[in-house]
């Protein structure tokens, strides 16, 4: 009975529709979208593993960095020789790339010659292979009349897995595609080629780049389509590459920009990842290959194996009696008798069954019509599975690029090469359709590489030359912003000399060294309510501070900020101070204290000459202010007069300080060691506690706060102060507002100023003034960056030479952008969005250059501030006659607080230039406003 049932079963199969019969037999090869998404997810996991330094060694998919950092942008040029070694034949080519002809304009001329590789060389030693290649190169040069005495750039396409430490090195990991040349595995094939060229002699070659055929395909297609950032080969072998964010490539130092990664996806499944998708036919193909257990994915996909897979399926079905009435010929049993070319022919649209019959008859078979239909369908399923697997792999790569760019929609081009893709009539259409179905939100364009991988290798070399030339020119520009150790020591010495000169009565000094009439820092005994007013930039701040004696942590602070319109900043003095009085009135009303006469401290962050704590004559406006009838006038009186004009409230303005002095007081309230303060924000300035005996200029007019005798009369009597008894020794120091921003106004910084610095200075509202401030402060750094970017663009080194209206607009590059762009946490995509906000569209390389420009200019600013600070702390140390000084510097300002690297570089420079000083930097939490209130408290207590 069993025999009857078996006969009945096979008879029913024989009568079944031939395509359904094959579908049932090869159901495991027919992959649905859920399975393809699963394979894609597995590949994504393998990619991540291969990119990580920790897991790369164990990863099957090696994700090899290629050191190709940019795709073509159309400006490449030059003449190159190229070698293309990737199969049983290799090519020698001469390639000419014409400038400004890329991106859909053509412009590449190619002459080539193909040289066969004898079997004995293919199975011989590595030296024999490269000697043959080198001799063929020499023959080509002779045939094309290429001057052998001239040095020629050489590009090398080597289509086997290599580990590349640099663009011109490649250590062979393993042979693929049935190559078995001895003595090269683990060796640098580029060096092997160099040695062979030396042995051959009569040639002078500079090997600029080695790439595999996949990378070269991407570069070839990228020359004509700027969106091409993926390359795929579907031929004798298979592989894919793409542009990965460098910060994800652990095997390469650096995290700025992109790098092309060769996935080497042919090895997917070598670790068992695809075991549940592998059929018995895949296992047999693998077992009979020269590398069992290796390149599993490639053996399911590539042209070297598709024909053999079809043969094994046909053979098995014939043996089971499902084809040819069970007849099997010796030809069908012979490996390699069905090729991938046969598979393509069997799927040709017009005459697929005719071709199928011819192929089967050549194997001594007598196929029926149903046999031909069945075998043709087998070919379709095998090749369809190949295109489906490639689609799943590409979906993984595109998904990764999507995530890198943090975008849902992706517009990208994939460059494709390989005999399967080119010659199989249905393969491209199937592949495109499945990729788009798996990723419907991606706009994917496929471009066939028409000139092959050799052109791509030459383009890699051309891009490398372009990037090297560009980097050299950009570096030359940025080198002018780099300060040597000797220059920093010179700046320190000049600042020290200017500080000393500013303390004297005779002769002008660019560093004003203005007495502040603040004789001591807070000691914690301050208490009561005080009003603080703060004008230092585009904002005016009113603040109420309530100090509790001995309880610094319990200080209560309330404030309100008012924006100062440009028309007020640059109108009349009366309009400015009326506006300030209006803001104060609004704040007092807001606090419900309009009828209370409060003592007030006024932070006024512009150069003033003071003859008392509550008297200050404005010397000059800075930071964009130009209000008329203010310079030469007492600004405290101007505020008092404005308050009188409003006739709404009354204030007791007991002290005026600038923001630097206010910051010193605020930080000294927290740390008694604080004797210096730095502002690094919109402006730049320093103050410090100087010995009164050194302040010669103050002896002409200096007086103490109310109730305090002049120190010069030698009176030894005690003077009642805010916290008990003080002797004259309590007034031996005074805070000096250096106004160090004026350093260099006499030309002493000309040797470190660049042409861009000079342009910014000349186009400012105060040409020739505050030159040190213009090199170090937030008001000007962004404009210096804009000038540098503009000049680089004019020279064709940025934004493809396109000078946008935005780039020509002064002030558009705000200093806050420096802090954002230089942030270590900010991805290039986010930097690109900042540039787009300013109307600037740039490539990845452009963005890196912008970051480098920002870094050079902010670093110089921090170093200059550090050199100046070293001069100040060293002076204090020598004033006190100490071998070693411990001191705290209070700091405020957006540049110091918000820029990711400014504070570190400033501190490092200060400590290096003042090695005998232990300097602690203390950021001010409440800023200079609280300091003004503290000085008001000191003044009231001294009265």
Image (cartoon, rainbow, N blue to C red):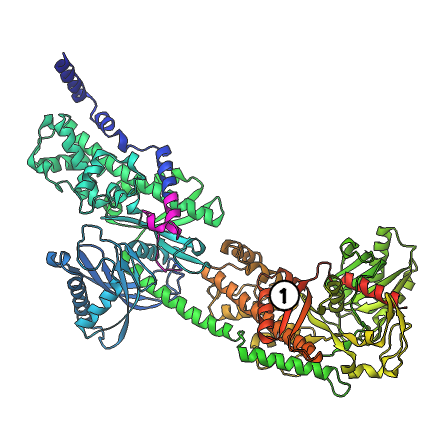
Image spot of residue 639 (x, y percent): 86, 66
Is residue 66 magenta-colored? yes
In x, y percent, where is residue 560? 78, 54
> Looking at the rendering, in which quadrant would you find the C terminus?
bottom right
- Total residue callouts: 1
**Residue 689 in view, yes or no:** yes
Q: Which residues are magenta?
A: 45-69
Q: Is residue 916 above or below residue 67?
A: below
In the image, is residue 917 above or below residue 296?
A: below
Q: Is residue 70 left or right of residue 311?
A: right
Q: Quadrant of residue 455?
A: bottom left
Which residue does the image show at 22% across and 51% down from the upper left?
176
Above or below: residue 2 compared with residue 398: above
Depth order, front residue of 911/493: 911
* CA neighbours of label 1 inside 10 A, class few (<14), some (14 to 19), many (20+): some
- Residue 596 place in picture, x, y as percent: 91, 56
Disc 1 element: loop
| Residue 744 is at least partly visible in this image | no
Q: Quadrant of residue 559?
A: bottom right
Rendering coords of residue 463 (x, y %): 37, 64
778 is within the stretch colored magenta: no
Most foreground residue, 397 or 687: 687
Is 317 placed left or right of 265 in the picture? left
Picture quarter containing residue 665? bottom right
- 343 shown above or below 751: above
Residue at 35 percent of width and 67 percent of height: 77
* Residue at the disc numbered 1: 811
């Amino acid at each position: 009975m069993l025999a009857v049932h078996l006969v009945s079963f096979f008879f029913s199969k024989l009568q079944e529709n031939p395509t359904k019969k094959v579908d049932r037999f090869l159901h495991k090869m027919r992959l649905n979208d859920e399975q393809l998404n699963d394979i894609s997810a597995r590949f994504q996991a393998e990619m991540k593993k291969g990119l990580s330094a920790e897991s790369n060694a164990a990863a099957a998919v090696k994700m090899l960095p290629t050191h190709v950092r940019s795709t073509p942008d159309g400006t490449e040029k030059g003449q190159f020789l190229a070698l293309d070694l990737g199969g049983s034949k290799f090519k020698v080519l001469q390639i000419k790339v014409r400038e400004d002809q890329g991106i859909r304009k053509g412009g590449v001329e190619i002459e080539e010659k193909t040289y066969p590789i004898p079997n004995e060389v293919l199975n011989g030693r590595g030296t024999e292979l490269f000697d043959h290649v080198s001799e063929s190169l020499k023959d080509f040069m002779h045939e094309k009349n290429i001057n052998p005495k001239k040095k020629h750039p050489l590009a090398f396409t080597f289509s086997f897995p290599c580990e590349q430490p640099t663009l011109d090195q490649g250590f062979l990991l393993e042979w693929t595609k049935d190559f078995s040349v001895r003595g090269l595995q683990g060796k640098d094939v580029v060096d092997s080629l160099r040695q062979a060229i030396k042995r051959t002699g009569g040639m002078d070659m500079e090997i600029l780049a080695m790439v595999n055929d996949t990378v070269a395909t991407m570069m070839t297609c990228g020359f004509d389509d700027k969106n091409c950032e993926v390359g795929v080969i579907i031929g004798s072998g298979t592989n894919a590459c793409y542009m990965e964010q460098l910060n994800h490539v652990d095997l390469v130092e650096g995290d700025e920009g992109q790098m092309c990664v060769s996935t080497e996806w042919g090895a997917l499944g070598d670790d068992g990842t695809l075991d549940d998708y592998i059929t018995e036919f895949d296992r047999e193909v693998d077992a009979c290959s020269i590398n069992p257990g290796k390149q599993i994915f490639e053996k399911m996909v590539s042209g070297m194996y598709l024909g053999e897979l079809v043969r094994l399926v046909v053979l098995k079905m014939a043996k089971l009696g499902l084809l040819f009435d069970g007849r099997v010929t010796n030809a069908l049993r012979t490996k390699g008798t069905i090729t991938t070319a046969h598979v393509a022919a069997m799927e040709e649209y017009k005459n697929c069954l005719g071709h199928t019959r011819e192929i089967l008859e050549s194997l001594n078979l007598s196929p029926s019509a149903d046999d031909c239909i069945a075998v043709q369908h087998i070919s379709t399923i095998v090749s369809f599975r190949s295109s489906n697997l490639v689609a799943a792999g590409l979906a993984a790569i595109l998904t990764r690029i999507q995530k890198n760019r943090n975008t849902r929609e992706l517009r990208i081009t994939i460059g494709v090469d390989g005999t399967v893709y080119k010659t199989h009539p249905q393969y491209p259409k199937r592949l495109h359709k499945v990729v788009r179905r798996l990723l419907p939100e991606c706009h994917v364009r496929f471009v066939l590489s028409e000139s092959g991988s050799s052109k791509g290798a030459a383009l890699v070399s051309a891009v490398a030359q372009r990037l090297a030339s560009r980097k050299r020119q950009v570096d030359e520009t940025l080198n002018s912003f780099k300060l040597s150790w000797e220059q920093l020591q010179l700046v320190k010495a000049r600042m020290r000399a200017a500080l000393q000169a500013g303390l004297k009565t005779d002769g002008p000094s660019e560093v004003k060294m203005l007495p502040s009439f603040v004789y001591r820092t807070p000691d914690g005994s301050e208490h009561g309510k005080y009003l603080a007013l703060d004008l230092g930039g585009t904002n005016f701040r009113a603040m109420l501070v309530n100090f509790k004696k001995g309880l610094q942590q319990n200080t209560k602070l309330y404030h309100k900020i008012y924006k100062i319109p440009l028309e007020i900043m640059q109108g009349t003095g009366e309009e400015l101070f009326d506006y300030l009085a209006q803001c104060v009135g609004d704040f007092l009303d807001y606090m419900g204290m309009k009828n209370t006469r409060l003592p007030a401290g006024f932070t006024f962050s512009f150069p003033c000459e003071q003859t008392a704590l509550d008297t200050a004559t404005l010397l000059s406006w800075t930071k964009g202010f130009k209000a008329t009838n203010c310079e030469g006038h007492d600004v405290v009186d101007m505020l008092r007069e404005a308050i009188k004009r409003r006739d709404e409230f009354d204030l007791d303005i007991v002290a005026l300080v600038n923001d630097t002095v206010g910051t010193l007081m605020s930080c000294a309230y927290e740390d008694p060691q604080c004797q210096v303060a730095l502002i690094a924000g919109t402006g730049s300035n320093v103050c410090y506690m100087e010995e009164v005996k050194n302040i010669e200029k103050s002896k002409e007019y200096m007086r103490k706060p109310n109730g305090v005798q002049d120190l010069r009369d030698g009176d030894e009597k005690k003077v009642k102060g805010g916290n008990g008894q003080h002797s004259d020794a309590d007034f031996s120091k005074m805070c000096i507002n250096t106004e160090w921003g004026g350093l260099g106004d006499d030309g002493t910084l000309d040797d470190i100023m660049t042409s861009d610095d000079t342009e910014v200075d000349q186009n400012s509202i105060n040409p020739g003034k505050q030159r040190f401030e213009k090199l170090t402060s937030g008001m000007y750094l962004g404009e210096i960056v804009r000038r540098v970017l503009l000049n680089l663009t004019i020279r064709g080194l940025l934004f493809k030479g396109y000078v946008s209206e935005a780039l020509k607009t002064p002030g558009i590059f705000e200093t806050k952008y420096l802090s954002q762009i230089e942030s270590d946490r900010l991805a290039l995509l986010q930097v690109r969005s900042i540039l787009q906000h300013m109307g600037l569209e740039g490539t990845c390389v452009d963005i890196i250059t912008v970051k480098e420009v920002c870094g050079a200019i902010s670093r110089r600013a921090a170093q200059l501030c550090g050199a100046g600070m070293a001069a100040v702390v060293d002076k204090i140390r020598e004033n006190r006659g100490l071998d070693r000084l411990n001191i705290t510097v209070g700091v405020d300002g957006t540049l110091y607080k918000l820029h990711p690297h400014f504070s570190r570089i400033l501190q490092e420079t200060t400590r290096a230039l003042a090695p005998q000083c232990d300097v602690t930097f203390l950021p001010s939490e409440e800023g200079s406003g609280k300091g003004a209130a503290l000085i008001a408290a000191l003044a009231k207590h001294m009265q």
